[in-house]
Image (cartoon, rainbow, N blue to C red):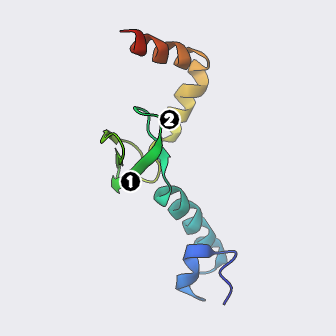
Amino acid sequence: MTTKKLGPMARYGSRYGYRLKKKAKNVEVVQKAKHECPKCGKKSMKRRSNGVWACTKCGAVMAGGAYSPHTGAWKGILSILGGKRVEMHEMRERS
């Protein structure tokens, strides 16, 4: 059995079909990966439980999506704000 295409989903063997395993793989890879912490900026944010994300470096805990720390709505907000996000971040550092 080859695990190159399916990676962690190869544990299911010939059950459930390729398409379902491919979708599950995409979700699991994002869920188990380390993400960038919005507080300290390091790539150390991990999923603690469903919708709860914690940074292993600074200890920050935040609510987010079930499989990734930022939901689709959050990404839409960032695209609307554009360059204003940097200005808001700089204002927080000044105060």
Q: Earlier in the sequence, mark 1 or mark 2?
A: 1
How packed mark 2 is, by other alpha carbons closer than 10 Å (few <14, some 14-19, many 20 or more), is few
Measured as percent of width and height from the top left, residue 73 is found at 50, 35
Question: SS of the residue at dot 2?
Answer: helix
Q: Residue at x 41, y 9 (%)?
A: 94
Relative to 42, residue 39 above or below:
above
Q: Amino acid at mark 2?
A: Ala
60 on left or right of 91: left
Residue type at mark 1 is Arg
What whole-number distance in Å separates the C-alpha atoms at marks 1 and 2? 19 Å
Q: Quadrant of residue 48?
A: bottom left
In percent of width and height, residue 91 lies at 44, 10
Q: Residue at x 69, y 77 (%)?
A: 4
**Residue placed most toward the observer, 69 or 18:** 69
Residue 78, quarter of the rendered image: top right
Q: Is residue 91 left or right of residue 2?
A: left
Question: Foreground: 29 or 57?
Answer: 57
Front tag of 1 and 2? 1
Name above or below for residue 64 compared with residue 93: below
Residue found 39% across the figure and 42% down from its top: 64
- Quarter of the figure that contains the N terminus: bottom right
Quadrant of the rendering where the C terminus is positioned: top left
Residue on which the image places disc 1:
47
Identity of the residue drawn at 48% across and 14% down: 90
Secondary structure beneath dot 1 equals strand
Q: 10 Å neighbourhood of mark 1: few (<14), some, or many (≥20)?
A: many
Residue 93: x %, y % from top left: 41, 15
Q: Position of residue 71 (x, y in %)?
A: 48, 41
Along the line of sight, the residue nearer the viewer: 4 or 72 = 4
How many numbered circles does the render carry? 2
Q: Which mark is residue 73?
A: 2
